[in-house]
Amino acid sequence: MQQLSIDLAALFKFSFQQYKSYASFIIGAVLTFIVLAVVPQIYFMMRAPENPTMQTQFFSFLLTAVQLFLSLGFTKLMLMLVQDAYVTVADMFNNFRIFLSYFVASFIYGLAVSMGLFLLIAPGIWIAIRFQFFPYFIIENGDSSFTALQKSYNLSQDLLLELFVFGVAVVFLNLIGALLLGVGVIFTYPLTTMATAIIYRSLIEESDTIPASSYQT
């Protein structure tokens, strides 16, 4: 694959255009994710006893599984919307068939990133960048956990610095969204999720540019 660069301005411009086109649906999806996944997790963390019991550990695992399930659905929605595909609310919840692969891959990915960050920081960042596209392979192809992680590793080769800069932009935007009383996340989270999906699709389509011409306004 030839050396590519990511045009951040064009990337976020198209993401913003798609956000505006599907604003009411996207806002509804974000609020659904927050209410069903984020709020219960925060509430549990605030009320959890200092000495966890088997019951609280099981409940924590259950909440994490729900959060991952809804995260998978939300990622799928954003991937479909950047391609102007027809979507319904059901697309956020009808992913039981691929959830196990996503759950296992997320566990491996999260563990590897955490270990890398704990050891020297840089390895964790490298792992986070190289394997970040695994959800899309599971969503589009129904790939197994290890296959999706391997494909993500191959897809992101020779683009490490560009993806690092993009990752910094994603963190910065979502941090701003969080600082705006959390309300800004309703805009920044889907915007950055769509931008990631556009990079994935541009790489899959072997485009000469990122974003590909079909994802530019």
Image (cartoon, grey):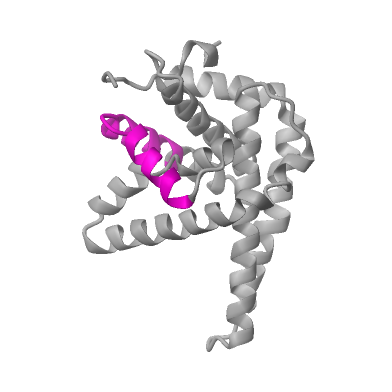
Residue at image position (56%, 31%) is 194
Is residue 100 positioned above or below 163 on the image?
A: below
Q: Nearer the viewer, residue 33 or 178?
A: 33
Q: Nearer the viewer, residue 28 or 128?
A: 128
Q: Position of residue 4 (x, y in %)?
A: 31, 20
Q: Is residue 149 magenta?
A: yes
Residue range highlighted in magenta: 145-171
Q: Position of residue 160 (x, y in %)?
A: 28, 34
| Type of secondary structure dominating the magenta stretch | helix
Residue at image position (24%, 52%) is 123
Whether residue 183 can be seen here? no
Is residue 25 positioned above or below 205 on the image?
A: below
Q: Is residue 100 magenta?
A: no
Q: Position of residue 145 (x, y in %)?
A: 47, 51
Q: In terms of image quadrants, where is residue 58?
A: bottom right
Report the side of 105 relative to 66 (left or right). left
Report the side of 215 relative to 207 (left or right). right
